[in-house]
Amino acid sequence: MDRLTAMQVFVEIAERSSLTDAARVLDMSRAMVSRNLESLEQWLGVRLLHRTTRRVSLTDAGNEALQRCRDVLALTGDVQAIAGVRQTAPRGKLRIATSVSFAQAFLTNVVATFLDRHPKVEIELLAQERSVNLVEERIDLAVRIGNAPDSALVARRLGVCRSVLCASPEYLRAHGVPTDPASLEQHRCISHAYVGRNELRLSQKKQMIKVPFHGALQTNESTVARQAALRGAGIALLPTYLVSADLREHRLVRVLPEYEPEALDIHAMYLSRQHQPPLLRLMLDHLAEQFGQSDAPWDRSDADADASAVASAIPSTSVKKVSIATRKAEPSTKPVSRSRSTSRKK
């Protein structure tokens, strides 16, 4: 733990008599504030604060340490102002967590590009379908997909994750194409354990509707849902970062294209903006650069699937009750190889 940061945290808590207020001022999570305080107390070997559910007050040792911590912080500021900060090649190690599918489809390439630019850096990329605890698991950065980011962490929005309802041409030839959201109940569906497990939120002309969505097959991993859809197991809700190439090459066909599934935000999640390691700042800027525009990189190239694509993939003689509105499809790029981010985060 950075002792200077821990001293700054202690000073803010003492001046505001509140861990929560100190966390807000320092732009840290409350958990990180507590961890810094505990680290400083352990290093000094004394208890600095009396803490109850209602108030925080200085111990005798804390009162004595407060001014000395202020002196150290002031001296540090003077030294930095005089000497400046040396510019050196980035080095060190970052631990980054994200979902399996997002790591495979996008983030691995981003990390590889970063390592090309900064050869003295090491990165541990942890791909898993659960929300990691950044403090306990020593994670520097988590890339999560969902519209309810953890309020205990700092969230930097990177872009938007869009999804589509899609199925294989073989499934649609055998079972027909749904003509409206209600007709999904007559189809076999493949659902994600955390996103749209029992209900879909679809929008048409800015009107949001909720549709029951019960999966004959449920999985906690988007790559598994994609494979099942390719196999003809049913209709799946899948992120465009994972299936843009499948749609473009007609291995999968978009259904109900006039209805847009609810989009999810993509966030970079970390513990604090204060005293960020330079390497973490570099990675955050690199991620922002890779996303760049309002549309995600995989949503920027050629169309995923329009009415003519559906017609070419599914002969009209074998389709039951086909009713597909012609529309301009969303662009996409081919992924490298999904939650989760999920409404739940990594």
Image: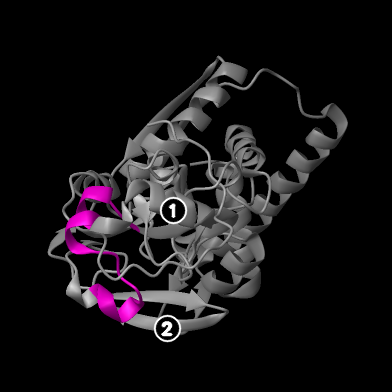
Name above or below for residue 140 compared with residue 236: above
Callout 2: few (<14), some (14-19), or many (20+) C-alpha neighbours within 10 Å? Answer: some
Q: Residue furthest front?
A: 317
The structure residue drawn at horizontal position 19% and vertical position 48%, both measured from the top left corner, is: 228
- Gap in angstroms between the C-alphas marked 1 and 2: 25 Å
Residue 149 position, x and y percent, is 47, 65
Q: Amino acid at mark 2?
A: Ile
Q: Residue furthest top?
A: 119
The one nearer the camera, 264 or 245, is: 245
Residue 69 position, x and y percent, is 64, 51
Q: Is residue 346 visible?
A: no
Residue 260 position, x and y percent, is 47, 68
Pointer 2: what residue?
209
Label 2 sits on a secondary structure element that is strand
Determine if the magenta segment contains residue 306: no
Circle 1 or circle 2, nearest the eye = 2
The one nearer the camera, 278 or 170, is: 170
User: Of label 1 and label 2, which has the lower sequence position?
Assistant: 1
Callout 1: few (<14), some (14-19), or many (20+) C-alpha neighbours within 10 Å? Answer: many
Residue 52 position, x and y percent, is 41, 79
Q: Which mark is residue 6?
A: none
Where does the magenta region start and end?
166-184
Determine if the magenta segment contains residue 171: yes
The structure residue drawn at horizontal position 31% and vertical position 51%, both measured from the top left corner, is: 315
Label 1 sits on a secondary structure element that is strand
Pointer 1: what residue?
144
Q: Is residue 28 left or right of residue 231?
A: right
